[in-house]
Image (cartoon, rainbow, N blue to C red):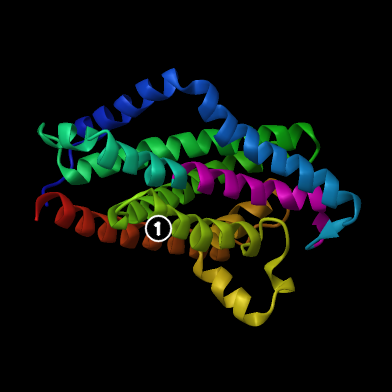
Amino acid sequence: MKMPESVYVLAVYNRQYRVFRKLLGSSLVSNVANPILFLFAFGFGMGSFIDTMSGMDYLTFVVAGMIGYSAAFAASFETSIGAFTRYFLQKNWDAILSTPVTLAELMMGEILWASVKALFSAVCVLIVGWIWGGVPTSFEPLIALPIVFLGSVCFACAGLVATAYAKGYEFFAYFFTFWITPMFVFCGVFFDIGRFPDFIQYLAWGFPMTHLVAAIRPLTAGTEVDVAATLLHVGYIIVFSAAAFWVAHRKLRQRLYD
């Protein structure tokens, strides 16, 4: 595989951006309004029954979780159902691959766009959380954004794995049921994972969402940051991303060229 050229990666990214501008309303509803509604419901609804979680205000606890979840959902949806539609139904990938763009460059363009879109969704949640008083500091959360972007890349790569193996839209029921939903409920979004049985905790630490939330929560909450632990979390996310990209590229190359 030759070294990808950034101009082709950006060309794929630009194509997705142009389409996004035409579908701005529906995209904002699913990728921004949905996580904000969850933040409001759990932050204020559950917050009226739970004062603190892991030594911090419950709304503050939930903000970091919803930032991670909003990024995960946006990136995963874009490179699973969205990418599968472009590949399988609309045949856009066939058209792109008939140009000098390679499969790796196409995938990187898809991942870059999905990650930027996911970061935008996460920033919206962060701003709303700050307005509602769930973000007690103003500078540290900005440091969390590059980590959120790396997490978005990871989730985008995982979405492409699902696309690589999908033979129809029905396949994504498995992806969202056994990938997105467990991250939503077990990975520290709404509750400290220490409250779950041991086998659930072991499962949770296998998901990149747990590592993303654990890395960004001290930054959004304004608590002490364990630099070594944060680097380990980020390292796990990077390794997972590379592995997922390799699997997706290998399978897609088989499906498209063999």
Mark 1 secondary-structure assignment: helix
Give the left or right position of residue 159, taking residue 87 as reference: right
Give the left or right position of residue 208, taking residue 49 as reference: left
Q: Main secondary structure of the magenta part?
A: helix
Picture coordinates of residue 207 (x, y %)?
51, 64
Compared with 26, 86 (above or below) is: below
Picture coordinates of residue 69 (x, y %)?
59, 49
What is the residue that sits farthest to the bottom in this orientation? 198
Q: How many marks?
A: 1
Residue located at (56% from left, 35% from top): 30
Stretch in magenta:
55-75
Q: Is residue 209 magenta?
A: no
Residue annotated with mark 1? 238
Residue located at (68% from left, 32% from top): 127
Picture coordinates of residue 177 (x, y %)?
52, 59
Picture coordinates of residue 183 (x, y %)?
57, 60
For the C terminus, the quadrant is bottom left
Q: Is residue 64 magenta?
A: yes
Compared with 201, 106 (above or below) is: above
Residue located at (33% from left, 43% from top): 84
Q: Is residue 226 at all visible to an observer of this figure?
A: yes
Q: Is residue 136 at all visible to an observer of this figure?
A: no
Front residue of this view, candidates 224 and 183 = 183
Q: Residues within 10 Å of mark 1 (few under 14, many from 20)?
A: some
- Image quadrant where residue 195 sits: bottom right
What is the residue that sits farthest to the top in this orientation? 22
Give amino acid for label 1.
Ile
